[in-house]
Amino acid sequence: IHRGSSFKTSETPPERRQRSHNMFSTFTGCCYGDSQEGTEVKYNNLSPTDEFVAPALKLQQLSSPTIPPLGSARSLSPEEKESEKARLQSLVASFARKAVRGCFCTYLKEGPYRRLETQYRIDKSLEHLILQTPEDPSNSEVACPIAAIQDIYSFVEDGAICFPADILDGLNAEECERLLMVVFSNAAGKLFRFCLIEESRESRDEFLECLRILCIYSQSSK
């Protein structure tokens, strides 16, 4: 059962910073209201000991201008493109192996606000991002179809204006640096969000880049 928060879009901040590694170029919108509704999403439960080999992602599909190399404003040479594809393949494969087994995070649940120390996981088909229920890992707090992700926001790059005030009120400055918000839609096009705190700045950046790639891969595979 998904219990993420539904919301309405509002105006985009006038000076929203251009992002490199977590901007889905085909999506827009930033800030959201606070109504609470859930929708049902089914997924296959996994054992933490399940073996997983990341599929060979079609990274040639990811070499278009919609996914520029990080920190680069110029075109890549053929050799650099191959190097970048190899880097992305290795990065996503490593992330997927860890995420299938479970990655620790803090889920910031809304309505009413609660902090839950839990894990997020990705199923072996790379189709759902799942936040486990702490008391019962076989159940989920959130099950988000990766192909349905509209955007992923970080406090560091997008600022406080993109995040719910009641979430920010409970965080210190260091936690804000690791804060993320995932926005996704259900089959009816209704938007939902959920917020989490990653364990480190490095895992935050890895989450942003790899989920961005997996989202585009999932959409291209439909």
Image (cartoon, rainbow, N blue to C red):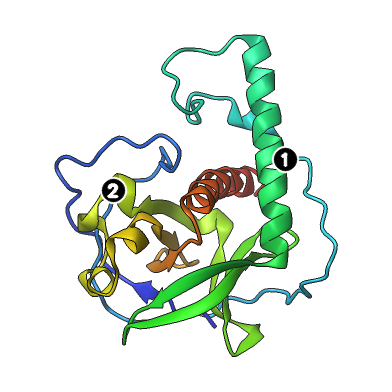
Q: Residue shown at 76%/72% (left/top)?
A: 48
Whether residue 159 is situated above or below residue 167 in the rendered picture: above
Residue type, numbered disc 1: Leu
Q: Residue shown at 25%/68% (left/top)?
A: 168
**Where does the image place residue 46, in percent across and percent down from the top left?**
76, 74
Q: As drawn, is 10 to the left or to the right of 129?
A: left
Whether residue 30 is situated above or below residue 129 in the rendered picture: above
Whether residue 11 is situated above or below residue 192 in the rendered picture: above
The quarter of the displayed image where residue 58 is located: top right
The quarter of the displayed image where residue 185 is located: bottom left
Q: Nearer the viewer, residue 173 or 187?
A: 173
- Helix, strand, or loop for circle 1? loop
**Where does the image place residue 148, in percent across and percent down from the top left?**
51, 57
Q: As drawn, is 186 to the left or to the right of 181?
A: right
Residue type, numbered disc 2: Asp
Q: CA distance from mark 2 to mark 1?
A: 29 Å
**Where does the image place residue 69, in percent across and percent down from the top left?**
51, 25
**Where does the image place residue 219, in percent across and percent down from the top left?**
59, 47
**Image quadrant occupied by the N terminus:** bottom right
Mark 1 burial class by Cα count in 10 Å: few <14, some 14-19, many 20+: some
Is any part of residue 38 visible from this angle? no
Q: Nearer the viewer, mark 2 or mark 1?
A: 2
Q: As drawn, is 33 to the left or to the right of 131?
A: left
| Residue 157 numbered tag | none
Residue at the disc numbered 2: 158
Q: Residue shown at 42%/63% (left/top)?
A: 189
| Residue 57 numbered tag | 1
Q: Residue furthest top?
A: 77
Mark 2 burial class by Cα count in 10 Å: few <14, some 14-19, many 20+: some
